Image: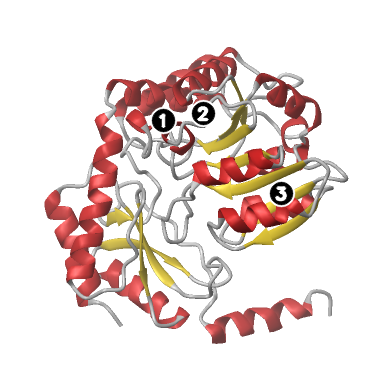
């Protein structure tokens, strides 16, 4: 029977505790949210919502076409200008998602004959970009500049090292300055995904490359998402103007995809403006993450020390993690549940995201629920 193999795979996932299901949430969910990526609490901020509504009223519901046809509006170019200025890069290119931005950057910067050196802990979007790239990919040990250096020594042509700045599973940060040094020894480029750094790390949330002194360098390219700290939707590539021009001409997820909806661009612009006026939100998100970690470890839980706003708590098995997350939800707390294949080390976890708008009481309540429901 056509697709009969799907049923067999579904049963295997069910037995292994790896089945995934969609769980629609209501607009006014009563759950305390430590599962979303709304690090700065901007997704429902009145200014951000009004920015989206105003853009939709002005430009309509959709971009109406690819960016190179009818999909570029004044909002898109303004957003690109503001993003580049805020993060310290020469230019920016907005795409429909962070995933599309990573596919665009990796494939466009890894032509035939090139080498891509990819961190073993990278996000799926970077991994997929490596798979689609025409260059050869070599996966190296996690957060290991020496491993990057050794890989680059095996290749004489164009090369680029690819890494998250903050890894989405455990929330640990990449050693960006050391990675850049390793790349510069061989004249290689550095491409980093700052999805979990923008809005949280760097001066006023300007991101991990800015904090490492790499923003604006002619050999560094960064991708960001607009769906985490900025509370909206979409993605962007930041870098030298000649790199951005190259993507406009070669990146398939830019050329052949419909442009970002005007409402999403308007929301991101409003969020950027708000963050510029309230830079303390970035530090608050980091402080909440540190408080979560301190309280969780004090309660005897195996929590990983966060470098940004992601805090993970290890579970004994996929089934235990699923049950733990369900028990938290029943107790009024929403947490992420990461299981294989989403975790590169095979260890299942609860994944908590700190938000700048969480109160001390909410943090204490979250830790109490997690401790009381531990498997």
Q: Which residue is mark 1?
A: 206
**Residue 231 drawn at (x, y percent):** 41, 37
Residue 19 or 239: which is nearer the viewer?
Answer: 239
Instruction: Please tell me whether residue 210 is drawn above or below residue 68 in the rendered image.
Output: below
For the point 12% across and 54% down, which residue is it?
Answer: 361
**Residue 188 drawn at (x, y percent):** 70, 40
Residue 44 sits in quarter: top left
Q: Please, what secondary structure does the residue beneath circle 2 have?
A: loop
Apparent side of residue 22 relative to residue 50 in the rendered image (left or right): right
Residue 100 visible somewhere in the drawing: no
Any mark on residue 215, and which?
2
For the point 48% across and 18% down, which residue is it?
Answer: 85
For the point 31% across and 32% down, which residue is it?
Answer: 45
Q: Earlier in the sequence, mark 2 or mark 1?
A: 1
Crowd class of label 2 (few under 14; some 14 to 19; many from 20; radius 10 Å): many
Quarter in which the C terminus is drawn: bottom left
Q: Please, what secondary structure does the residue beneath circle 3 have?
A: helix
Q: Earlier in the sequence, mark 2 or mark 3?
A: 3
**Residue 194 drawn at (x, y percent):** 51, 41
Instruction: Please tell me whether residue 14 is drawn above or below residue 244 in the rendered image.
Output: below
Quarter in which the N terminus is drawn: bottom right
Residue 289 or 365: which is nearer the viewer?
Answer: 289
Q: Earlier in the sequence, mark 3 or mark 1?
A: 3
| Residue contact at pointers 2 and 3, CB within 8 angstroms | no
Q: Which residue is mark 3?
A: 129
Residue 94 sits in quarter: top right
For the point 36% across and 51% down, which residue is it?
Answer: 307
Apparent side of residue 302 relative to residue 300 in the rendered image (left or right): right
């Amino acid at each position: 029977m056509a697709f009969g193999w799907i049923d067999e795979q579904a049963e295997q996932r069910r037995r292994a505790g790896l089945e995934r299901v969609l769980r629609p949430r209501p607009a006014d969910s009563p759950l305390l949210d430590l599962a979303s990526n709304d690090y700065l609490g901007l997704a429902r901020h009145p200014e951000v919502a009004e920015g989206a509504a105003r853009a939709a009223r002005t430009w309509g519901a959709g971009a109406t076409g690819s960016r190179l046809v009818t999909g570029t509006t004044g909002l898109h170019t303004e957003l690109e200008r503001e993003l580049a200025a805020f993060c310290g890069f020469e230019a920016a290119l907005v795409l429909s998602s962070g995933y599309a931005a990573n596919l665009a950057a990796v494939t466009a910067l890894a032509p035939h004959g090139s080498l891509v050196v990819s961190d073993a802990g990278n996000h799926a979007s970077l991994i997929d970009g490596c798979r689609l790239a025409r260059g050869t990919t070599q996966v190296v040990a996690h957060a290991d500049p020496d491993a990057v250096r050794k890989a680059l020594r095996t290749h004489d042509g164009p090369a680029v090292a690819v890494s998250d700045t903050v890894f989405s599973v455990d929330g640990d940060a990449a050693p960006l300055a050391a990675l850049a040094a390793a790349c510069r020894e061989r004249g290689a480029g550095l491409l980093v995904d700052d999805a979990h750094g923008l809005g949280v790390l760097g001066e006023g949330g300007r991101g991990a490359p800015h904090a490492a002194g790499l923003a604006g360098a002619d050999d560094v390219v960064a991708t960001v998402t607009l769906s985490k700290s900025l509370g909206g939707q979409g993605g962007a590539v930041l870098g030298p103007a000649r790199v951005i021009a190259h993507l406009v001409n070669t990146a398939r997820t830019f050329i052949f995809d419909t442009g970002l909806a005007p409402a999403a661009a308007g929301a991101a612009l409003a969020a950027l403006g708000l963050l510029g006026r309230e830079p303390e939100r970035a530090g608050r998100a980091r402080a909440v993450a540190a408080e979560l970690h301190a309280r969780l470890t004090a309660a005897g839980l195996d929590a990983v020390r966060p470098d940004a706003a992601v805090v993970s708590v290890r579970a004994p098995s996929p089934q235990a993690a699923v049950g733990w997350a369900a028990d938290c939800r029943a107790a009024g707390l929403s947490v992420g549940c990461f299981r294989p294949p989403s975790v590169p080390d095979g260890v299942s976890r609860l994944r908590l995201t700190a938000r700048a708008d969480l109160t001390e009481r909410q943090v204490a309540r979250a830790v109490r629920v997690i401790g009381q429901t531990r498997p």
